[in-house]
Image (tube, rainbow, N blue to C red):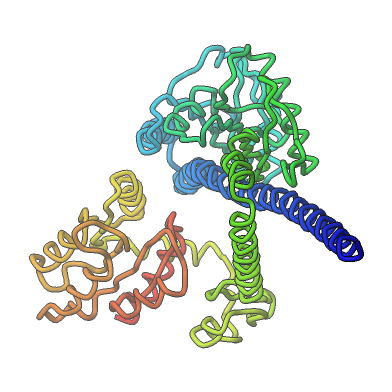
Amino acid sequence: MKQKTEQGHLTARYRLFTFFVLVLLAMIAVAGLWGSQRILLKNAARMGQNLAQSYASDEQHHIEIYQNVIRMGMTYLEDYTAAGASYEKIESWMIDFFQKAADATGEGNITFYAIVDEKIIASQPFEGIEQYDFRQATWYQQAIDARGQVIFTDAYKSVTGRQVVTVAAASPKSGNIIVIDLFTENFEHYHKNLSLIEDGAYYLCDSSGNLLFYSAPFDVDEAAMENYVKSVVYKASTGEQLENGKESFRDLNGKARGLYYYQMPNGWLSILSVPRAVLLEGMGVVVTWYAVLMVVFLTASVAYWLREGRLNKTIERTNDTIRVLGNSYYAIYRVDVDKGEYEMTKGSDYARQKLPYKGSYEALPETEEQNSAAADVLQGRHILLVEDNPLNMEITAELLKMRGAQVTPAANGREAVEAFEKSEPGFFDGILMDMQMPEMDGCEAARAIRNLNRPDARAVPIVAQTANAFAEDISRTEQAGMNAHLSKPIDMEQLCCILEELFTKR
């Protein structure tokens, strides 16, 4: 009897132990499911944010194209104006520039126009241009107030009733303005190859939340979509995201979605939303695995959880290190214009080794005599112009000719070397060399010219021109034997001053 009592106690203890083990396993299972869901959502959030930033990078690329077109056009328009060109010549050049800029951007239907001497010059005169009072337009005052900086308006209704975004810049000297109008079809054109995640939705909005473009799996009218996007923008502005199983918002089909966004420097907002079901894809498999073989799954889950934790910590440490180290190539200078002195206030180790720390320079006053001397330096000079972009070639050649230079064009480095080699010694007074070209780049061409067996090969001034002004570029041009370096678009006054100094040394 006593033995049976002891066995009963053992059985009860075993059952209690088993019960606690089962409860513990159940708690571990629930914790594992919760942890797995949390990891999936965290990874999904990281992926969504990276995608939103990637789409924003594409948008920023197009923004920079419009900015560069306006800056280039304004630079050359100011040169024409300063040179005293007639209104008719400026009008003819601007129309030609607008057409070539439209072809270069790949958007033939883009609307360009300029305000010169209070008159509108348009590549394709738009409806109502005669009655259009641009002085009353919001973009006009914004451009004037920006003093040369490129501005982007929020979306508004044009004189034709269409939604438009205006990109513009005004010269603080002459008051001339160059304008680009972007309509709905322009945004649709450069988004035609947009690729989204399954059932994903993408929205591009201006700084006020107005919808510029969207791609979404909803079949609704424009008004319903605009109201819906306003709620999406509000969610983005308050920083809400689908995280830790919390539903951020529901779409027009009633599905829960995650929200990821990125704001660009001009204020535009790139927004991506992804269905919660897509983010949690694979959770059904996880649940089935727990039901069929809980112990095995728990073991694998714990190992996976620990591995993911270590990986996330490693990634976080790496990101922290990158944030601490920063860019390897940068330098910040403080310049005292009155004293003619400069001093590096901050810079990477590479920059401190390669660039001067402090020094002085002569601040040359801008007088009419100096400007006149700089303008006359090209009179009668033979310049070899090396440029692979036809539009840049035409504009730069015209500006050189306006200052009295005779220009020989070359479309790449190989043609430049051949042209110099075939010329008589001393024929060319200088070479303006583009850096990035097909067949043979600027540095290769400069080295080839310097190595020619002729008396003027090592003496002829070579000035590099490129879209970048990094220390690496300057170092490469010096190693290739070039005398100076200029960034695009070329400042003709600066070029004349450089050539005057090089001609004197020669």
Residue nearest the observer in this picture, 491 or 322: 322
- The reply to whether residue 74 is visible in this rendering is no
Q: Is residue 113 above or below residue 419?
A: above
Q: Is residue 158 above or below residue 320?
A: above
The residue under the point 59% across, 16% down is: 162
Left or right position of 121 against 292: left
Left or right position of 476 against 225: left
Count the marks: how many?
0
Q: Is residue 340 above or below residue 63?
A: below
Q: Is residue 5 above or below residue 388?
A: below
Q: In what quadrant of the picture does the N terminus appear? A: bottom right
Residue 100 percent location from the top left of the image: 35, 35
The quarter of the displayed image where residue 193 is located = top left
- The reply to whether residue 7 is visible in this rendering is yes
Residue 486 percent location from the top left of the image: 42, 65
The residue under the point 27% across, 70% down is: 443
Residue 188 percent location from the top left of the image: 49, 26
Residue 141 percent location from the top left of the image: 71, 34
Residue nearest the observer in this picture, 251 or 221: 251
Left or right position of 384 against 304: left
Q: In what quadrant of the picture does the C terminus appear? A: bottom left
Left or right position of 425 against 253: left
The residue under the point 32% across, 63% down is: 435
The quarter of the displayed image where residue 425 is located = bottom left
